[in-house]
Amino acid sequence: MYFIQSERFLDAYLRCAEHVVNEGRRKSDMNEVQDLACLISPQLAEWTEFVAFVERISQDENLKHGAQKAKRAYERLSGNITKPSYIGRLKQYPFLKVGTNDFTPIDQLALVAEKFGEAPQSSNLSLSVFHPSDLRDAYRPGYVPCLSFIDVKYRDGELRTKFFFRSCDFAEVALFDFLHCSRIHFSIMENFKEQRPDVDIRESKILFFFSRAFTYKRKREPITAIRNAAALASET
């Protein structure tokens, strides 16, 4: 396992991408690593800058396709035959209620906030994007959600949101995964505060765990574009 820790999202992304490119096992036309973990201790001001940076560079020709792919997964409530909607799974997925024929959609984000309100120290604050039927219904390998599972823990004044990925393309999509997952993290935190204003959430952390992280050798221009934009931003 390779572990990266940072207080800045952009720094964390660039270090992860560098590790995948430099240390990844050569496999046909790609480099691949397994078990990459990244822990970020975000500050609101830095996160706001990160969001603005990503939104600004997302129209770059080398980044536009990845940005659009991420938007479809994280912002549109309905999926399609090539990829399910992650946010749709989190907000309105029709899981079958055990012992019934009830497929009423579940808002998992609202449900974990409710459970936090009942017991902030609960170990059951978990959300699922992956469903076993995805393996059956996959029309192509990429259909199975890359973001599989989210787990949230509150301990000793600290809130940690943990995002588990089965796979992630660190050239085309990973920067936008960091963006959208960070938004989910801060949304969860605000929902928890609304449920229990008496509970002191003094700090928060985000853990990304990538079971597989890769880059295609022929598609590394996005990493270069992000690195160049980051260098330019640091000079201004």
Image (cartoon, rainbow, N blue to C red):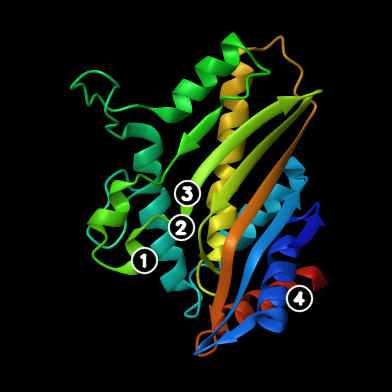
- Looking at the picture, which amino acid does disc 1 mark? Gly
Residue at the farthest front position:
99
Callout 2–callout 1 Cβ contact below 8 Å: yes
The residue identified by callout 1 is: 142
- Please tell me whether residue 116 is drawn above or below residue 79 in the rendered image: above
**At x 39% / y 53%, what residue is drawn?**
73
Q: In this view, does 25 lie to the left or right of 173?
A: right
Whole-Å distance between the Cαs marked 4 and 1?
32 Å
- Looking at the picture, which amino acid does disc 2 mark? Cys
Q: How crowded is mark 2: few (under 14 residues within 10 Å), some or many (20 or more)?
A: many
- Please tell me whether residue 95 is drawn above or below residue 82 in the rendered image: above
Q: In which quarter of the image is residue 194?
A: top right
The residue identified by callout 4 is: 231
The secondary structure type at the circle numbered 2 is loop
Q: Is residue 162 left or right of residue 235?
A: left
Whole-Å distance between the Cαs marked 3 and 2?
6 Å
Q: Where is residue 160 in the image (x, y as percent from the top left)?
A: 69, 36
Residue 146 shows which numbered tag?
2
The residue identified by callout 3 is: 148
- Looking at the picture, which amino acid does disc 4 mark? Ala
Disc 4 vs disc 1: which is toward the camera? 1
